[in-house]
Image (cartoon, helix red, strand yellow):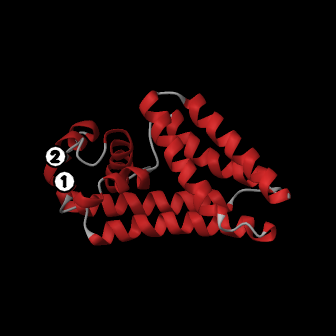
Amino acid sequence: MINTKEKIVNLGLELIQTRGINGFSFADIAKVIDIKKASIHYYFPSKTDLIEAVLEKYSTNFFEALEQSTASTLKAKLEYYTSLYRMNLIEGRICLCSDLAMDTYNLNDSINNKVGDFFQKNISWLEKQFTEYKSSQKASEFFAGIQGAQLISRNQKRIDYFDEVITKSIDDLLLSVEK
């Protein structure tokens, strides 16, 4: 059974990914979970504390999912990797760190550093995949493309846009590394 703290974190994750950090309050969480607002403050004295917990959970879950991949080819690895971002879009969400990055000036250094670490871990994972093809510089380009594609796809409410951009990016990348 999920305890109250986990319920708060899970709902916080959903709300940040769907509304952004300024699109909800502790009162919204309290109403959905059916607890008093003071109960939330018991676990998370501030919204920043909640965001830190949500970020930790999201990052851990993302990289655990990435490590569970059994893909063996570069194409399959990239398709699996991008599917982690696509799942958010299907649920009407966006990557938590993409959302937080858009609010950089509203967040403290600790959160911004953790968002930066998440992005760097993504790029490092991609570089590792591209190493045998001597194309590690393409990792940042590919990652930036994913970030942009999900933002536009979400704005236009078109998952097919994300699919088209990602498929083309993977195909182009594979062509470039095979040369």
Identify whether 90 is placed above or below 51: above
Q: Is residue 39 above or below residue 139?
A: above
The structure residue drawn at horizontal position 53% and vertical position 42%, both measured from the top left corner, is 149
Give the residue drawn at x 23%, y 39%: 34
Q: Position of residue 160 (x, y in %)?
A: 60, 29
Image quadrant where one finds the C terminus: bottom right
Looking at the image, residue 94 sits to the left or right of residue 27; the answer is right
- Residue 176, percent across and down? 78, 55
Residue farthest to the right, as pictured: 179
Q: Please tell me in which quadrant of the rendered image residue 47 appears.
A: bottom left
State the residue position of label 2.
Answer: 36
Q: Amino acid at mark 1?
A: Ser
In this rendered view, identify the residue nearer to me: 15 or 149: 149
Label 1–label 2 contact, CB within 8 A: yes
Estimate how packed mark 1 is, as few (under 14), some (14 to 19) or many (20 or more) residues with alpha carbons within 10 Å.
some
Query: Which mark is drawn over residue 106?
Result: none
Q: How far across and how far down the image is residue 96, in percent?
A: 42, 51
Q: Nearer the viewer, residue 100 or 58?
A: 100
Instruction: Classify residue 15 by image quadrant.
Output: top left
Image quadrant where residue 167 sits: top right
CA–CA distance in space, label 1 to label 2: 5 Å
Q: Where does the image place residue 99, in percent across and percent down from the top left?
A: 38, 49
Q: Nearer the viewer, residue 2 or 126?
A: 126
Which residue is disc 1 drawn over?
39
